[in-house]
Amino acid sequence: MILGMHATKLVVRDVTAAERFYAALGLKLVSRNEGGEADVRQSQAWMSVSGDSSTHMLILSEFREVSAPPLPAYPREFWLAFNVADVDRICEAVEANGGEIIRAGEDRPEHGVRAAVVGDNEGHIIEIVGPMSGSAAPVGDPLAARH
């Protein structure tokens, strides 16, 4: 039985560059480690919003002996999704740190949020969700507006 979501592991080509990118967006380093065995040794950076393991972690994992697979075509196989205070500011940070804007921030009244789609410095997709323009209140539950 699943008790909760612990972490999401993202395979990256350069763990140091990926760590810098996600730190620029606001994630904090929890731990770095070298691990694995045989041909699956990996360098990892564990990151979270809180800077510890009390919140869901993003594990950036660079495999040492195995090349990262090529990314599939857009929309890729999965997206990360972050709840942020200011969508447009995060988009600026994405571009300033080697990422790309795929879909600029726009208000999505049907969900009660402002949303953007960006690519990280390696091309992994991230959906950025925050309050609609003119609203200072954080988005606690993006689905709440639909109920």
Image (cartoon, rainbow, N blue to C red):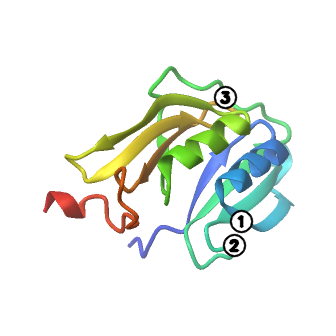
Q: As rendered, which of 43 and 100 lies closer to the eye?
A: 100
**Position of residue 44 in the picture relative to residue 54 (left or right):** right
Q: Say which residue label 1 marks.
A: 28
Q: As rendered, which of 120 and 94 lies closer to the eye?
A: 94
Q: CA distance from mark 3 to mark 1?
A: 26 Å
Q: How far from the left and from the top, in percent, is residue 100? A: 61, 30
Residue at (77% x, 31% y) in the render? 67
**Numbered mark located on residue 69 in the image:** 3
Under mark 1, the amino acid is Lys
**Position of residue 5 in the picture relative to residue 28 (left or right):** left
Q: As rendered, which of 25 and 120 lies closer to the eye?
A: 25
Q: Say which residue label 2 marks.
A: 51
Name the quadrant containing residue 1.
Answer: bottom left
* Marks 1 and 2 in Cβ contact (< 8 Å): yes
Element class at badge 1: strand
Q: How far from the left and from the top, in percent, is residue 14? A: 81, 39
Residue at (39% x, 44% y) in the render? 115
Q: CA distance from mark 3 to mark 2?
A: 29 Å
Element class at badge 2: loop
Q: How far from the left and from the top, in percent, is residue 34? A: 86, 58
Under mark 2, the amino acid is Gly
Q: Nearer the viewer, mark 3 or mark 2?
A: 2
Under mark 3, the amino acid is Pro
Q: CA distance from mark 1 to mark 2?
A: 5 Å
